Amino acid sequence: MTYRIATIIGSLRADSINRRVADALIRLAPSNFDFIDVSIGDLPLYNQDDDANQSAAVLRMKAAIESSGGVLFVTPEYNRSIPGALKNALDHGSRPYGNNSWSGRPAGIVGVSPGGTGTAIAQQHLRSVLTFFDMPMFGQPETYIQWQADLVNEDGIFADGSQAFFQNWMNTFSTFVTRNLVHQKG
Ligand code: FNR
């Protein structure tokens, strides 16, 4: 079967280093895995008043999550937490009450930062939310990545010294998804 993985990038920035890492990582996926880019930049600010009448952008995101067998989060750290845009997307997807689109889907987290902590604190905050959603969490290997200018080359490929690490991450993550698959519509 083909496994669909919803990919959520926590940065809205055009030249996002997290998107560059995500794109390079996805190139290493097994041939029976499709990674679907799920945009979050067009979502309105979450307002509980809208739960009974969610916007088209929210419904589009929820449908994309629900049609996936797993979720890959690739996110920067903002002020020692996750970016507001990502939290906004998580909140939208969790509602209306009783219809949480994230629940049960296996999740992997990757993050890259120019700083030495490599998004470790943001990832812990994200794990806290995803655990509340009852998403099986991919644990090892951890990916607290400090960005270096040559980490991803102009062709979108990891540098030689990093390629094996990311290939192992992808191999292990894809196996984790197949073992934890519960939902995948269609
Ligand atoms: C940052 N950055 C940052 N980096 C970090 O390691 N820990 C942090 O807490 C923060 N905080 C933070 C707050 C805000 C508002 C911004 C804009 C940036 C730096 C951040 O890692 C850097 O800008 C990355 O390039 C952001 O990732 P993208 O957008 O390139 O994927």
Image: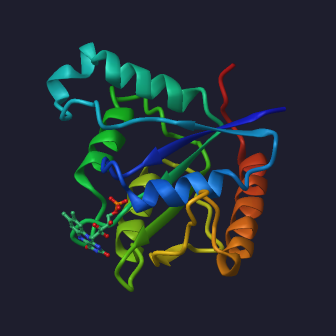
In the picture, which quadrant includes the C terminus? Answer: top right
The image's colouring method is rainbow
Is 127 situated above or below 92?
Answer: below
The residue positioned 81% from the left and 39% from the top of the image is 32
Q: Is 180 left, or right, of 6 in this rendering?
A: right
Residue 41 is drawn in which quadrant?
top left
- Which of these two is toward me, 28 or 44? 28
Tell me the residue at 53%/44% (across/down).
7
Q: Is residue 120 visible?
A: yes
Residue 34 occupies quadrant: top right
Residue 45 spot, x, y in % from top left = 18, 35
Which quadrant of the frame does ligand 1 lie within?
Answer: bottom left
Q: Quadrant of the N terminus?
A: top right
Q: Name the spot of residue 182 as percent of width and height, x first.
A: 69, 38
- In the picture as drawn, the residue positioned furthest to the front comes out as 154
Left or right of 53 in this view: 9: right
Asked if residue 131 shows in the view, the reply is no
Q: Is residue 2 left or right of residue 19?
A: right
Out of 181 and 42, give the one closest to the viewer: 42
Q: Is residue 92 above or below residue 136?
A: above
| Rendered view: 146 above or below 9 | below
Residue 166 image position (x, y, % from top left): 67, 68
